[in-house]
Image (tube, helix red, strand yellow):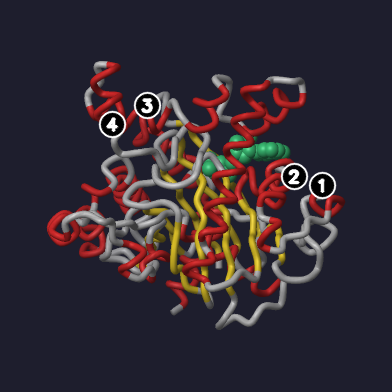
């Protein structure tokens, strides 16, 4: 089935036309939103697709990445008016993302009214978390009245990567205990038990958890008032600092980009090396803590731009995790598992591996599944 996947983010609108049967990417691209805003970037995608009548004739549907499904959406759904209203109603939880995702839905609907559309939510896979994992230790009224709880993100990627790992390492599907580490500009882990997410490192927003490109991950909540007073910032200013000036960029003072930091470290830049060490330490600590929800660990899977390509990060994380039984295979790790079916550790549990994720492809595959059902 030939489908268009649309991923409207804050900095770019990415798209791909995918043949889900052959896994072929027919066209793909990305338009930055800095020139004319997100609306203009979406229009550019529409113009590019509509300009190729042969392409349009072959399309069977459109899949949209939607960041937040709240507790309303537990899986991908075909979009109708009530689904649009549902996405709108959780917009307060993701004010920078859901309105943009809705804009994409409306623009594609009016450009291609004959095509069915499907929403694929970042949060849906984590709706299986139990209350002990998703509730904060806050007054419960905040959960009931304002939706304050942990939601988790990157769900489509975690779900796919855990499924692939089960197959690659021949694990028992209904019992496999897997931690997936999605490491891109944003980073999160998921603990996946028998194919269901039982814990994840991101929470109410994508700021919680691991050290990321420009996001701090976990900090003491007491910092907010301290920073506000010391720096004369309002709360929005503090949140901006934690989201955009922290993480790898903040520690290194140099860059949020892993490739640049690895190069800087190799040429002796101490701050870059420290940023990478903290990144690995915090990730390893997070992975180790997943023994609590999983009761044991069969496999740790790395994915995303960093997880798939940085042998240096995987090496240090696995060194920190030696007490859990991980034994890295240095040659396989240096080759990113490409000659070993993804495996970068010794071929005995707990396995460590690399699985490539592809969000636009996964959106298209989920769309095909929903439309076929
Ligand atoms: P996004 O979250 O925006 O989709 P990606 O998954 O593409 O981002 O990940 C981007 C990160 O991956 C950047 O930090 C980039 O430096 C890193 N990365 C990409 N290729 C490599 C590589 N060969 N070695 C190390 N890091 C890499």
Q: Which mark is residue 334?
A: 1
229 left or right of 186 in image: left
Q: Which mark is residue 311?
A: 2
Ligand 1 in which quarter: top right
Mark 1 crowdedness (10 Å alpha carbons): few <14, some 14-19, many ≥20: some
Regarding mark 2 in the picture, which secondary structure is present there?
helix
Q: Earlier in the sequence, mark 2 or mark 3?
A: 3
Query: Residue at the front extreme?
Result: 323
Q: Which residue is mark 4?
A: 224
Residue 313 pos. (x, y %): 68, 43
Marks 1/2 in contact by CB < 8 Å: the verdict is: yes
Q: Which residue is mark 3?
A: 241
Regarding mark 4 in the picture, which secondary structure is present there?
helix
Distance Cα–Cα, label 1 vs label 2? 5 Å
The residue under the point 31% across, 32% down is: 223
Regarding mark 1 in the picture, which secondary structure is present there?
helix
Q: Earlier in the sequence, mark 3 or mark 4?
A: 4
Ligand 1 within 8 Å of the CB at mark 3:
no
Q: Earlier in the sequence, mark 1 or mark 2?
A: 2
Mark 4 crowdedness (10 Å alpha carbons): few <14, some 14-19, many ≥20: some
Distance Cα–Cα, label 2 vs label 3? 30 Å
Distance Cα–Cα, label 4 vs label 1? 41 Å
């Amino acid at each position: 089935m030939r489908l268009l996947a649309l991923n409207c983010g804050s900095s770019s609108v990415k798209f791909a036309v995918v043949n889900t049967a052959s896994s072929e990417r027919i066209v793909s691209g990305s338009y930055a939103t800095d020139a004319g805003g997100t609306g203009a970037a979406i229009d550019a995608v529409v113009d590019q697709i509509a300009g190729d009548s042969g392409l349009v004739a072959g399309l069977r549907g459109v899949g949209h990445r939607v960041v937040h499904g709240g507790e309303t959406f537990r899986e991908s759904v075909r979009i109708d008016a009530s689904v649009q209203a549902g996405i709108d109603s959780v917009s307060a939880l993701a004010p920078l993302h859901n309105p943009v995702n809705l804009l994409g839905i409306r623009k594609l609907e009016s450009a291609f009214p004959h095509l069915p559309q499907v929403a694929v939510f970042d949060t849906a896979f984590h709706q299986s978390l139990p209350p002990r994992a998703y509730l904060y230790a806050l007054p419960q009224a905040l959960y009931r009245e304002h939706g304050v709880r942990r939601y988790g993100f990157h769900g489509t990627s975690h779900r796919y990567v855990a499924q692939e790992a089960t197959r690659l390492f021949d694990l028992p599907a209904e019992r496999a205990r897997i931690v997936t580490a999605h490491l891109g500009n944003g980073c999160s882990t998921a603990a996946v038990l028998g194919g269901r997410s039982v814990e994840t490192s991101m929470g109410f927003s994508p700021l919680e958890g691991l050290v990321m490109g420009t996001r701090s991950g976990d900090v003491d909540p007491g910092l907010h008032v301290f920073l506000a007073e010391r720096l004369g910032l309002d709360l929005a200013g503090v949140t901006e600092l934690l989201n955009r000036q922290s993480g790898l960029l903040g520690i290194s003072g140099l860059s949020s980009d892993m490739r640049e930091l690895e190069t800087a470290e190799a040429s002796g830049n101490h701050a870059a090396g420290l940023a990478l060490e903290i990144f690995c330490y915090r990730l390893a600590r997070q992975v180790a803590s997943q023994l609590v929800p999983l009761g044991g660990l069969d496999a740790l899977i790395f994915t995303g731009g960093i997880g798939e390509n940085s042998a240096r990060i995987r090496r240090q994380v696995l060194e920190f995790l030696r007490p859990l039984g991980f034994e890295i295979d240095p040659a396989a790790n240096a080759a990113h598992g490409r000659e070993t079916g993804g495996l970068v550790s010794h071929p005995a549990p707990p396995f460590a591996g690399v699985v490539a994720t592809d969000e636009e492809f996964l959106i298209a595959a989920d769309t095909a599944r929903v439309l076929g059902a």
